Image (spheres, grey):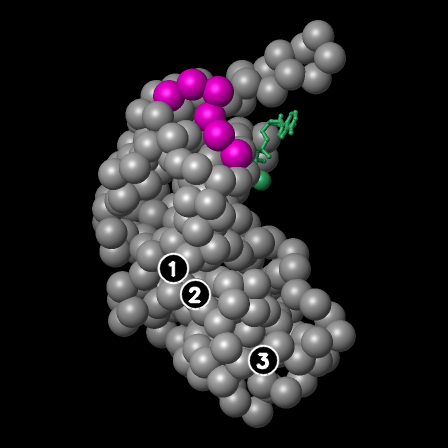
Amino acid sequence: MIECEKITKVYRTGDVEIEVLKGLSFRIEKGEFVAVMGPSGSGKSTLMHILGALDGPTSGVYRLDGHDVSKLSDDELADVRMNKIGFVFQSFNLLSRSTVLRNVMLPLMYAGVPEDKRRTQAEKALRSASLGEDRWHHLSNQLSGGQMQRVAIARALVNNPSIILADEPTGNLDSKTGEVVLGTFQELNNKHHHTIVLITHEPYVAEHAERIIHIQDGMILEDNKNHHRRMVHNHNEL
Ligand SMILES: Nc1ncnc2c1ncn2[C@@H]1O[C@H](COP(=O)(O)OP(=O)(O)O)[C@@H](O)[C@H]1O
Ligand SMILES: [Mg+2]
């Protein structure tokens, strides 16, 4: 599903060039739950932008479902970003003065889905993200951090994407709440078979994934199955 072949990324600022990614090759199959772990500045967000088709590599090939992403037309790229990939960020990025339900329905409005269908799909996504129905009509700024992240997860799910890309999704949460949110991802992966790429600088967070790709200085240091996976059982408590 995801295939990276010798991906590099060079940023130029003025006369200075920095090679942030130095030839990454890996595959992620449908239904996997993979953590990409590395210290701050190691190129994780840069990689996430490439995987999300938000930016292209400087060299190398990125294939998504067998298609070289650099060869897609603008329309095809927009379709990939809107329908194939769901994004979750550290800072939630919700509209604070809209209700939970409206926040989750929003991507469907851009996709031109009719109102009643927007609502049913949003409700389904909120259930998958385990956000209690009693919160759906709250404004998003009336929620706790963990609940906000569940709304963001529901919003990422609402187009039924095949891949969820989460960049430091527990970075703004206390450790207990972070754990519960990681449990939500585990459930989405186990029960709903979503492919999940979890980006983090924290080994403890990465340990919740089935496989850990460890990057450092723009290269893959290790890529292993995680035999000591931490499972979260109380994922509904927030
Ligand atoms: N748009 C950009 N222009 C120039 N340098 C960038 C840009 N984006 C990121 N960088 C640099 O690339 C390196 C990796 O950044 P990033 O991918 O955000 O790392 P991480 O997410 O692992 O912390 C950092 O040194 C950062 O300053
Ligand atoms: Mg980052």
Instruction: Name the N-terminal-most of marks 1 and 3.
Output: 3
Q: Position of residue 71 (x, y in %)?
A: 38, 30
* Disc 2 residue type (three-letter): Asn
Q: Does the magenta-highlighted stretch encompass residue 59? A: yes
Q: Which residues, given as a range, are shown in magenta? A: 55-60
Q: At 42% across and 57% down in the image, what residue appears?
A: 83
Give the label on residue 159, or none: 2
Name the main secondary structure of what is drawn in magenta.
loop
Q: Quadrant of the C terminus?
A: bottom right
Q: Which of these two is toward me, 82 or 134?
A: 82
Give the quadrant of ligand 1.
top right
Secondary structure of residue under mark 1: loop
* Disc 3 residue type (three-letter): Leu
Q: Are marks 2 and 1 in contact (CB under 8 Å)?
A: yes
Q: Which of these two is toward me, 115 or 189?
A: 115
Task: Classify residue 66 by image quadrant.
Answer: top left
Q: Quadrant of the N terminus?
A: top left
Compared with residue 152, is residue 68 higher up or lower down, i.e. above or below?
A: above
Q: Position of residue 13 (x, y in %)?
A: 70, 17
Residue on which disc 1 sits: 161
